[in-house]
Amino acid sequence: EAGVTQFPSHSVIEKGQTVTLRCDPISGHDNLYWYRRVMGKEIKFLLHFVKESKQDESGMPNNRFLAERTGGTYSTLKVQPAELEDSGVYFCASSSIGGIPFDEQYFGPGTRLTVT
Amino acid sequence: AQSVTQPDIHITVSEGASLELRCNYSYGATPYLFWYVQSPGQGLQLLLKYFSGDTLVQGIKGFEAEFKRSQSSFNLRKPSVHWSDAAEYFCAVAPTEYGNKLVFGAGTILRVKS
């Protein structure tokens, strides 16, 4: 079974440009999560999809970030326009059913975004 | 707000030596507790988890962790470290009433010297 995949693995863009990150969850997983790690800091939650619906987007930093999950399969995270402080590693995770007690989240390798 | 503290940014141990990585959390109730490991170029892999019951939990790769409610701690241990254990380790909690989001510590980088 394929794991969570993310594309690209690295992206270097200039301030003001747009970047789109993609995440393909494990097949059949309804729950998809985005997290971000800014250099040397904690990994922080961004948002959670259940199928194509946003269940919790409390961690999204501002309206320059747009996440979508059309059709409830893969997800994209667009940053427009990118700022220097957006640099970091963006992780995607998926889980099958969610809920209690807690459904294990399987993480992808992350996309390293560098904004210059 | 809930938070997770990993006080050691880097730890270096000799191969074959024992290991303990510290984790403290700040939260009113007992959350669900996790340890993840990230090797270079890999995603985060779950080592072990604690939900309830026996406070000493066994995980993969010979790791174990002990939950101590009185100390709000969930330290990770391994009796004998192998060179392949060199990686970054993350403690995480899931506050029980906040759905499925994880709150992570800043991570501890483990170096193993031969």
Image (spheres, coloured by chain):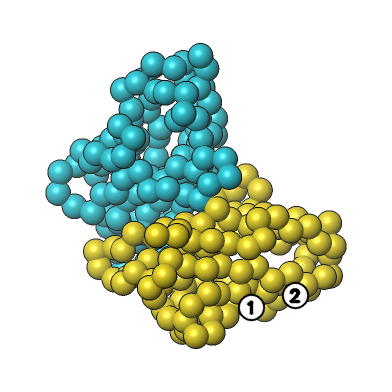
Chain colours: A yellow, B cyan
Q: Residue at x 77, y 68 (%)?
A: A82
Query: Badge 1 local density, few (<14 within 10 Å), some, or many (20+)?
Result: few
Q: Is residue A40 left or right of residue B45?
A: right
Residue A50 place in picture, x, y as percent: 41, 78
Q: Which residue is mark 1?
A: A66
Q: Is residue A61 left or right of residue A105?
A: right
Q: Which residue is mark 2?
A: A80
Q: Is residue B9 left or right of residue A103?
A: right
Query: Badge 2 local density, few (<14 within 10 Å), some, or many (20+)?
Result: some
Secondary structure under tag 2 reads loop
Residue B46 place in picture, x, y as percent: 38, 48
Quadrant (top left/top right/bottom left/bottom right) for the C terminus of chain A: bottom right
Residue B74 place in picture, x, y as percent: 32, 41
A2 or A71: nearer the viewer: A2
Q: Is residue A92 left or right of residue A38?
A: left
The circle on residue B46 is: none
Q: Residue at x 85, y 62 (%)?
A: A14
On screen, residue B90 above or below A50: above
Q: Mark 1 near mark 2, Cβ–Cβ under 8 Å?
A: yes
Chain letter of the residue beneath label 1 in the structure image: A
Q: Quadrant of residue B63?
A: top left
Which amino acid, by three-letter code, is at mark 1?
Leu
Secondary structure under tag 1 reads strand
Query: Disc 1 or 2, which lies upstream in sequence?
Result: 1
Residue A2 place in picture, x, y as percent: 45, 60
Chain letter of the residue beneath label 2 in the structure image: A
Residue A44 visible in the picture: no
Q: Residue at x 40, y 32 (%)?
A: B21
Which amino acid, by three-letter code, is at mark 2?
Gln
Mark 1 vs mark 2, CA separation in Å: 8 Å
